[in-house]
Structures are given as structure tokens and as C-alpha cells.
Image: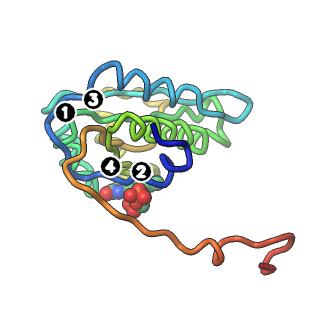
Amino acid sequence: MMNVLELLKTRRSIRKYKSTPVEPEKLDKCLEAAQWAPSASNKQPWEFLIVTDEKKRKRLAEIHPYGKFVAESPVVFIPLTNPEVHPKYHHADTALATLQFMIAAHSLQLGTCWAGVINSDIEPNIKDLLKIPNHLKVLALVAVGYANETRTSKRKPLESLVHKESYGLK
Ligand SMILES: Cc1cc2nc3c(=O)[nH]c(=O)nc-3n(C[C@H](O)[C@H](O)[C@H](O)COP(=O)(O)O)c2cc1C
């Protein structure tokens, strides 16, 4: 088992998947990880929708211009946010829950990839397809499954991001 820092650094966005189904017990663990994310005033302004049906996944892939991989991933995790529960922080809170889901998935050897939906004109189509009620918003489509590729990624150097005591001081 990797330690947390290793887990955080080795998670990669996976865009090619094997057809191997995801074990329901593993999915439950990922959902529990999401459930235990911190949230402003502990309001938990989220709900989670799981889609495995192939027809629906293919339709989601047609709808999302940069999320074609959800046609292939056996599971799509769809975090929903409720602005009525926390108008100011619902996006931030649900993003944290989503990342917790993704890190838990990585710890269980599952790959994921976030396909963003916030502020996008495809949201009504997704809501129609999955009968998502009006008061909820779709944060993302997150592909989940066993990776059929290995990926690398890059980050900006820490020196360019970190300031000490006041802005601009290294
Ligand atoms: C808010 C958000 C939206 C994203 N949307 C997409 C997307 O629509 N399609 C996609 O292929 N990847 C998407 N990604 C994945 C990023 O491209 C990926 O996280 C980034 O390139 C860093 O790679 P890594 O996750 O492997 O470290 C998104 C990630 C975030 C956090």
C-alpha cells in the first residue's frame, strides 16, 4: 500500500480503459471516501450518481466534447451539487468530494478522469438524459475503471508557485 503522498503524486488522468467491470465493493469504498470530504459548515451539498449502463455512457460520450472516454470506462461517477444547500461553497465542496473519490480509486488500482461540466452548455443534455432534478448541478463526469494505458504528467516547479511571508519573497 502506497503512503498518501505517493498516492497523490502517482494518480494520473486515465483516458483508455479495459472493459473489466469495477467491483461493487471498490466502488462503495470510493463513494465512502467522497462522503467523508470536508465541506463548508459540514453542509455536504452533494449527491452522487453512478452510471454503468452502456447506452447511457455512449450517449454521455456523445454529449461531452472532451469526455469521449466515458463510452469505454465501465463506470461514470457523476458528482452533483446543490446550490440551495450552500450557495457559496457548493462547487468547492463537491470538488473536494470528487478528488477524494479519485484518490481512493487510485489506492484501489482504479483509474479515473475528470471531464468538467461546470458552466458548460452541455449540462441540460446530461440532466435530461439522467433525469437529474432542476435544483441540482452537474459538476463533472468522472470515468472510472481499470487503466488500459500508462500516463505521465508535469507540474510547474514549486519555486514558481510558493511565496514566503509576503508575496514575491522566496
Ligand atoms: C476541473 C477539471 C476539468 C477537467 N476536464 C477534463 C476534460 O474535460 N477532459 C479531459 O480529458 N480531462 C479533463 N481534466 C483532466 C486534466 O486534463 C488533468 O487533470 C491534467 O491534465 C493533469 O493530469 P493528471 O490528472 O494526470 O495529473 C480535467 C481536470 C479538472 C480538475
Q: Earlier in the sequence, mark 1 or mark 3?
A: 3
Q: Is residue 164 above or below residue 79?
A: below
Badge 4 crowding class, 10 Å Cα cut-off, few under 14, some 14 to 19, many 20 or more, is some
| Real-space Cα separation, disc 4 to disc 2, in angstroms | 27 Å
Q: Is residue 33 above or below residue 138?
A: above
Q: Is mark 2 within 8 Å of ligand 1?
A: yes
Front: mark 1 or 4: 1
Residue 89: x percent and y percent? 65, 41
Q: CB of mark 3 within 8 Å of CB of mark 4?
A: no
| Real-space Cα separation, disc 3 to disc 4, in angstroms | 17 Å
Front: mark 2 or 3: 2
Q: Earlier in the sequence, mark 4 or mark 2?
A: 2
Front: mark 1 or 3: 3
Give the residue number, with chain letter if any, for mark 4: 122
Give the residue number, with chain letter if any, for mark 1: 56
Q: Looking at numbered disc 1 in the image, what kind of residue is underneath it? A: Lys
Q: CB of mark 1 within 8 Å of CB of mark 3?
A: yes
Direction from residue 56 to residue 87 in the image, left or right: right
Q: Earlier in the sequence, mark 2 or mark 3?
A: 2
Front: mark 3 or 4: 3
> Which mark, residue 11?
2
Q: Viewer-proximal residue, 167 or 120?
A: 167
| Residue at left offset 49%, top offset 55% | 9
| Real-space Cα separation, disc 2 to disc 1, in angstroms | 27 Å
Q: Viewer-proximal residue, 60 or 165?
A: 165
Q: Is mark 4 within 8 Å of ligand 1?
A: no
Q: Looking at numbered disc 2 in the image, what kind of residue is underneath it? A: Arg
Give the residue number, with chain letter if any, for mark 3: 51
| Real-space Cα separation, disc 2 to disc 3, in angstroms | 22 Å
| Residue at left offset 34%, top offset 48% | 113
